[in-house]
Image (spheres, rainbow, N blue to C red):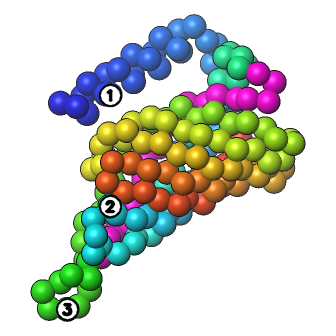
Amino acid sequence: MKKIIGLAVLMSAFSLTAQSFEFDEDKLYAGGGLGYSNHDVSGVDNAIGFQFFGGYDLSDDVKIGDKISLAAELGYATSGDFESSNCPTGFTCIGESANGLWANAVIDYDIDGKISILGRAGLDFGDDDGLMFGVGGGYKIDDKLSARLEYVTRDHYSSLQANVVYDF
């Protein structure tokens, strides 16, 4: 039920936003990368997963400041398979993974045209449903390509993520 209510609120917010803004394909971007995930349960080892996402830059439509931009992102992430070192046999066992869709608002502060810091907040609709937050930094490689390093936390696991982003 929590997933359905969260998704309905999010879709309503996006539809109201879409009605008041003119869609511009040049504001779209896509990205993806790897995440080194840590489960909150003791005795569970870290995992390596991946994520991919798409975003829309709202900076021209929602002015916060000259150096601050706002974007909406929708993506999919998997934590990778967590392993447990607490198996009855003493061997490492394959544990669970957390997978699912997420939606975030991302605020980016441009430091010098190449380096930026960012923060994110939103909802995860997958196995680890609930609130999701993150902080990190970005480096603009050229006009179309940038790299991000972020720490993202959800209800049951957190991850250090390295992503590449392509602006269309």
The amino acid marked with disc number 1 is: Leu
Q: Which mark is residue 90?
A: 3
Left or right relative to 63: residue 41:
left
Which percent across, then down, holds residue 35?
A: 50, 62
Q: Which mark is residue 40?
A: 2
Q: Quadrant of the N terminus?
A: top left
**Secondary structure character of the magenta stretch overall:** strand
Other-residue count near label 1 (Cα within 10 Å), few / some / many at <14 / 14–19 / ≥20 = some
Q: Residue furthest front?
A: 42
Q: CA distance from mark 1 to mark 2?
A: 25 Å
What's the magenta region?
65-83
Res 110 → quadrant: top right
Instruction: Kindly identify the residue that appears in the image at 61 percent across and 12 percent down.
Output: 21
Element class at badge 1: helix
Q: Earlier in the sequence, mark 1 or mark 3?
A: 1
Left or right relative to 17: residue 65:
right
Instruction: Kindly identify the residue that appears in the image at 39 percent across and 24 percent down.
Output: 10
The amino acid marked with disc number 3 is: Gly
Report if the CB atoms under discs 1 and 3 are less than 8 Å apart.
no
